[in-house]
Amino acid sequence: MPDLRSIFLSLSSRYTDDKQLSDRLWKEIEKAYSGKKRHYHNLVHLEHLYRQLETIRSETGDWDILLFALFYHDIVYKVSRHDNEEKSAELARERLAELNIPEERTERCVAHILATKGHSIAVDSDTNLFTDADLSILGQPQQVYAEYCLQVRREYAVYPDFLYKPGRKKVLRHFLEMERIFKTAHFYEALEMNARANLRWELEQD
């Protein structure tokens, strides 16, 4: 398993010598992703996302900014809200400013995070790699995908089945109706067929 704390501290140390600042930012991230209601959007999700991104590191244009997007893309996550991505991006902008990261690169991180809301194709190839990696759980072996389904359902436990199931099915059909779920060649070739099989399988469940 990747050591997320070490990865973040190493990342932030490239922009600040203030170890207290780096430690404070990491603790904020760790606390957010360790919330009791986080059954999928947690530290394990970040570990999975890191492993997926690491395989295509050589294809990325700004690895550090992708890593910052990884750590901040779900830092704000409440199932009752519809602006989680915007709030997460806003917090990322504030924290990267504390690290004295140039505005142009910060805005690239913000764009990566906001793109996870709709997962539509972007001009920036790094954004496409990031959103594909974020969706990579869809193309995992069915046993892994089935556990993911249970975790998402637990996160939405506040909603009864008669509200949750129609909404979930709408999401599944949305992905299946897309010409391609994964925008980049790497993820498309590796995961597209399996993802569609998993989505169809979930739709068939009661």
Image: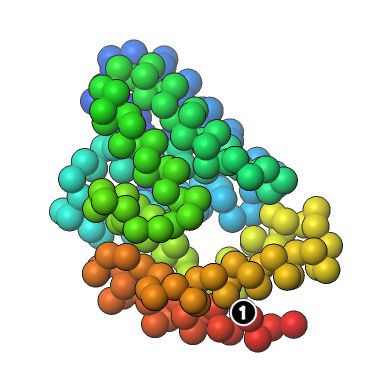
Where is residue 37 drawn, in percent x and y? 70, 47
Q: How many marks?
A: 1
Q: Residue at x 37, y 24 (%)?
A: 96
On screen, residue 186 above or below 81: below
Secondary structure of residue under mark 1: helix
Q: Amino acid at mark 1?
A: Glu
Q: Residue at x 42, y 81 (%)?
A: 194
Q: Residues within 10 Å of mark 1 (few under 14, many from 20)?
A: some
Q: Residue at x 80, y 64 (%)?
A: 163
* Residue identifier under label 1: 202
Q: Nearer the viewer, residue 129 or 145?
A: 129
Colouring rule applied to residues: rainbow
In the image, taking residue 37 as reference, residue 175 lies left or right, namely left
In the image, taking residue 25 as reference, residue 171 lies left or right, namely right
Q: Is residue 105 in sight in this rendering?
A: yes
Q: Quadrant of residue 189?
A: bottom left
Where is residue 138 drawn, in percent x and y? 48, 70
Where is residue 46 drawn, in percent x and y? 45, 49
Where is residue 196 drawn, in percent x and y? 47, 80
